[in-house]
Image (tube, rainbow, N blue to C red):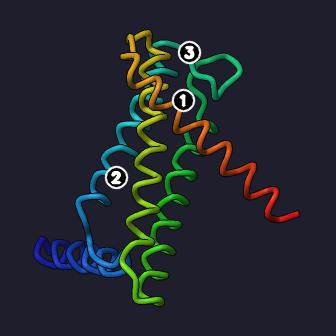
């Protein structure tokens, strides 16, 4: 029975790795950052009662479920990017998407630590401001392109 379970888990892992176009250090980093972000979000809500995601600032199962769903959809977007890489014979689409999501998770982790009262070095805050301004200008440019 133990061998069958190990074989099944290995087969599922191989399928997932193949679907993502192979497992990379960047994908591992993204998954690690997603877990860190989720855990720090739980700490902010559960221990510090300072969450911006709920009215009370405390833990709420709906907010936690939304966070898991967002992370799952992020991984689906990475999967789409990996499949696009295969379709067009490229290697940069998935990497670009993974790096963008890593940057997003990093910002969220820093925001969570700030909500815990941990002082954030100025250089990191300036980098986050630059990334957020860039993201906002890209959204504005996209809206203008659609008009």
Left or right for 75, reference 63: left
Query: Where on the picture, by quarter, is residue 8?
Result: bottom left
Residue at x-position 40% and y-position 45%: 34
Left or right for 100, reference 136: left
Looking at the image, residue 68 lies above or below residue 80? above
Mark 2 and mark 3 in contact (Cβ < 8 Å)?
Answer: no
Q: Position of residue 121 (x, y in %)?
A: 36, 16
Q: CA distance from mark 3 to mark 2?
A: 25 Å
Residue at x-position 80% and y-position 56%: 143
Crowding at dot 1, Cα within 10 Å, few <14 / some 14-19 / many 20+, comes out as few
Q: Which residue is mark 1?
A: 129
Left or right for 48, reference 132: left
Q: Which SS class for mark 2?
A: helix
Closest to the camera, between mark 2 and mark 1, is 1
Closest to the camera, between mark 3 and mark 1, is 1
Q: Which residue is mark 2?
A: 31
Q: Which residue is mark 3?
A: 50
Q: Earlier in the sequence, mark 3 or mark 2?
A: 2
Q: CA distance from mark 3 to mark 1?
A: 22 Å
Q: Position of residue 96 (x, y in %)?
A: 43, 63
Q: Which SS class for mark 1?
A: helix
């Amino acid at each position: 029975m133990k061998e069958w379970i190990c074989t099944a888990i290995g087969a599922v892992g191989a399928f997932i790795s193949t679907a993502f176009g192979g497992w990379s250090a960047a994908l591992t980093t993204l998954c690690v950052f997603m877990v860190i972000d989720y855990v720090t979000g739980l700490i902010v809500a559960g221990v510090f009662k300072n969450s911006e995601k709920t009215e009370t600032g405390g833990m709420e199962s709906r907010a936690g479920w939304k966070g898991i769903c967002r992370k799952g959809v992020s991984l689906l977007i990475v999967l789409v990017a990996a499949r696009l890489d295969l379709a067009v014979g490229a290697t940069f689409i998935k990497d670009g998407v993974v790096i963008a999501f890593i940057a997003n998770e990093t910002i969220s982790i820093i925001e969570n630590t700030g909500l815990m009262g941990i002082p954030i070095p100025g250089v990191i805050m300036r980098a986050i401001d630059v990334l957020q301004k860039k993201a906002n200008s890209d959204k504005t440019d996209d809206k203008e392109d659609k008009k």
